[in-house]
Image: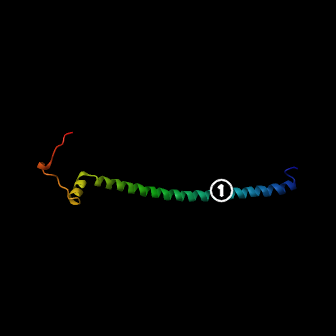
Amino acid sequence: MRLTSPRALLFVVPLLWLAVLGSAAAAVYCKHRSRVLFVQLEALDAHRDNLDIEWGQLQLEQSAWSTHAFVENVARTKLHMTTPAPQDIRLVSP
């Protein structure tokens, strides 16, 4: 059977036509999937940026709360702690 015979062409042409349609459908699907994944990537990038901002704010807050002056202020106001008088201080040696 030769490829140029009418019978062979009746079989090969529809087969090639289906292959072209399948390839086109696959290209469209790949492009759509690429766009969907890009939108997800952009959303995740925005979320990451927001988390970075929040992390920076939390680090600033932690550094502000851990300053010696802040701890001393909380000890005086909330816990009513005071520095002992010099005569009340006892040195203990090991």
In the figure, residue 14 lies in which quadrant?
A: bottom right
Q: Which residue is mark 1?
A: 27
How many labels, in total?
Answer: 1
Q: How is the image coloured?
A: rainbow
The one nearer the camera, 83 or 7, is: 83
Q: Position of residue 22 (x, y in %)?
A: 71, 57
The one nearer the camera, 63 or 52, is: 63
Q: Residue at x 77, y 55 (%)?
A: 16
Q: Most extreme residue toward the top, as rendered?
A: 94
Q: Quadrant of the C terminus?
A: top left
What type is the residue that disc 1 sits on?
A: Ala
Q: Is residue 92 left or right of residue 17?
A: left
Label 1 Cα crowd, 10 Å radius (few <14 / some 14-19 / many 20+): few
Q: Residue at x 32, y 56 (%)?
A: 61
Secondary structure of the residue carrying tag 1 is helix
Q: Residue at x 47, y 56 (%)?
A: 45
The one nearer the camera, 92 or 49, is: 92
Q: Position of residue 26 (x, y in %)?
A: 67, 57
Q: Residue at x 29, y 55 (%)?
A: 65
